[in-house]
Amino acid sequence: MAQDYAKRFYNSVQWKRARELYIKSQHYICEDCGGIACVVHHIITITPANINDPEITLGASNLKAVCKDCHADAHAGRTKLSGISFDENGNVIKQANVYLVCGSPASGKSTYVAANKTNNDLIVDLDYICAALMGEPDNMYLDNEPILSVALEVRTLLYNIIKARRGKWRKAFVITSIANVTEQKVIANELNAEIILIDTPLEECLKRLRNDQRRVKRVGLFEGLIHKWHREYTV
């Protein structure tokens, strides 16, 4: 039942419209159990302090389509929703289950993720996304320029899902070759992620590149990217 301070909001045209649009966008499927969704839940609970913040009350990143049982569980604090649990007041408690894996090309980022992931984890890698969009899931290093802009939009959508902790995944690994430490921290803060640095020496990265048959047709490009990363990365 809505608190007195929130009744006006829940009766508003803006909320009813936002609720209907959101639950339709999820095809009336519960984002936690896969059942029939009939409730739009606020991940960060509405309080007197944030009720006038439209990002909290109406923003899609703070909404989740759920069934009645999952909604009751969330408010009772009986479950963890993909890295989110609730205290006795219904406030969200985020856990450090997202990792921003940073490093030079050929540093071993994908190898690190493969060694630490489980079957229920989410992996976000622009190379993987491009390969999937081109129908070449086993060839990550084709020329992706024609579909790069689309791949970046897909990655942004995945970032938004991770920020909201939507879905039933347990951990998320976000792989990036961004060398700028400030930019790394900005992304980590947005995703509430822990930074994992794969600090492989320059010569080792170049050696791995030359032995990687998947990149043989674009070895010149990747050599440049490796040198650029090691030139720009500063602690």
Image: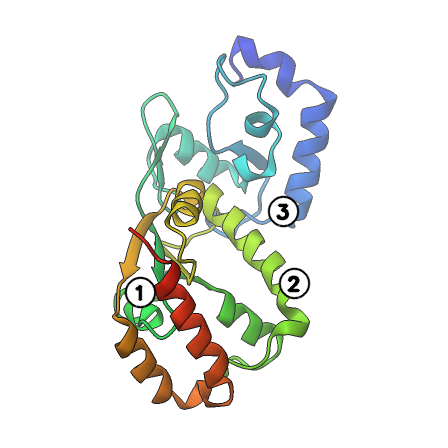
The amino acid sitting under disc 2 is: Ser
Residue contact at pointers 3 and 1, CB within 8 angstroms:
no
Rendered image quadrant of residue 201:
bottom left
Mark 3 surroundings: few (<14), some (14-19) or many (≥20) residues within 10 A:
many
71 and 131: which one is in front?
131
- The residue that label 3 is drawn on is 28
Q: Earlier in the sequence, mark 3 or mark 1?
A: 3
Q: At which x and y percent is residue 73?
A: 40, 35
Residue 71 visible to the viewer: yes
Q: Nearer the viewer, residue 54 or 10?
A: 54
Name the residue rendered at 41%, 29% in the picture.
75
Crowd band around label 1 with a 10 angstrom C-alpha radius: few (<14), some (14–19), many (20+)? few
Q: Secondary structure under badge 1?
A: loop
Q: Say which element carries label 2.
A: helix
Relative placement, left or right, of 192 versus 17 is left
What residue does disc 2 label? 149
Q: Which residue is mark 1?
A: 118
Secondary structure under tag 3 reads loop
Q: CA distance from mark 3 to mark 1?
A: 28 Å
Marks 3, 1: nearer the viewer? 1
Q: Are marks 1 and 2 in contact (CB under 8 Å)?
A: no
Is 235 situated above or below 215? Answer: above
Which mark lies nearer to you, 1 or 2? Answer: 2
From the image, state whether disc 3 or disc 2 is nearer to you. Answer: 2
